[in-house]
Amino acid sequence: DADVTQTPRNRITKTGKRIMLECSQTKGHDRMYWYRQDPGLGLRLIYYSFDVKDINKGEISDGYSVSRQAQAKFSLSLESAIPNQTALYFCATSDFGRTSGRGRDTQYFGPGTRLTVL
Amino acid sequence: GIQVEQSPPDLILQEGANSTLRCNFSDSVNNLQWFHQNPWGQLINLFYIPSGTKQNGRLSATTVATERYSLLYISSSQTTDSGVYFCAVFPSSGAGSYQLTFGKGTKLSVIP
């Protein structure tokens, strides 16, 4: 969905480096999420935020941190990247159904960031 | 936490054929969504369907919440339907009730 953008789209880095992945949305949604996808697996939730002051850990938050700089921006950081964090990372948004009318927390995904940690 | 199982894991279809994908979940849910991930990795929301039946073109979905399963039907498949189909749920209660839990997906390949 073009309304949810992620930068960078691809990144190769080395073990121990600090990496930040950024997500921006123009959908006006209050809820934002970070997921990772590994080959053969579904998506797993890293962190989620229901508004700027509400940030929560997901299923696999260890080794990650997040920052909700504004309603429209949600960043994911890897403080010291390790090879098993090599994955496809997705940002998503939802609005609790207020604007879309499609139902609570219908999720809209960004294009993904492919991260490789050597 | 809640378990989400999808079947079959892989499916190969001839163009024009119909298919049914299944999603079973281990606990009650108040939110169920189907997604399509195309070969380029983009995830598209297909349906929000915690119960009942919905149709969108050649795709339709049915969720029987009391029996804890959902079905995604694809009719007259086209090569553009190829990709991975994911089912995802929010549990009705518990610590994970604000976390969308995904199944591992069904990989569909439609051949001309």
Image (cartoon, rainbow, N blue to C red):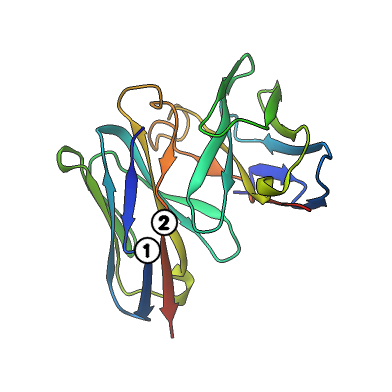
Pick the front one: A27 or A88:
A88
Pick the front one: B26 or A109:
B26
Is residue B110 shown left or right of residue A9? left
Outermost residue, left direction? B66
Is residue B95 shown left or right of residue A62? left
| Residue B93 rendering spot, x and y as whole percentages | 31, 23
At label 2, which amino acid type do we have? Gly
Marks 2 and 1 in Cβ contact (< 8 Å): yes
**Chain under disc 2:** B
Above or below, A115 against B58 in this view is above
Q: CA distance from mark 2 to mark 1?
A: 6 Å
Q: Which residue is mark 1?
A: B9
Label 2 crowd bin: few (<14), some (14–19), many (20+), radius 10 Å? many
Q: Is residue A32 visible?
A: no
**Chain under disc 1:** B
Pick the front one: A82 or A101:
A82
In which quarter of the view is residue B109 placed? bottom left
Outermost residue, top direction? A53
In which quarter of the view is residue B8 placed? bottom left
Above or below, A86 against B50 in this view is below
Which residue shows up at 40% across the image and 22% down it?
A: B95
| Residue B17 rendering spot, x and y as whole percentages | 30, 78
Disc with the residue nearer the chain's start (2 vs 1)? 1
Label 1 crowd bin: few (<14), some (14–19), many (20+), radius 10 Å? some
Which residue shows up at 34% across the image and 22% down it?
A: B94
Q: Secondary structure at mark 2?
A: loop
Q: Secondary structure at mark 1?
A: loop
Outermost residue, bottom direction? B112
At label 1, which amino acid type do we have? Pro
Q: Which residue is mark 2?
A: B105
In which quarter of the view is residue B25 placed? top left
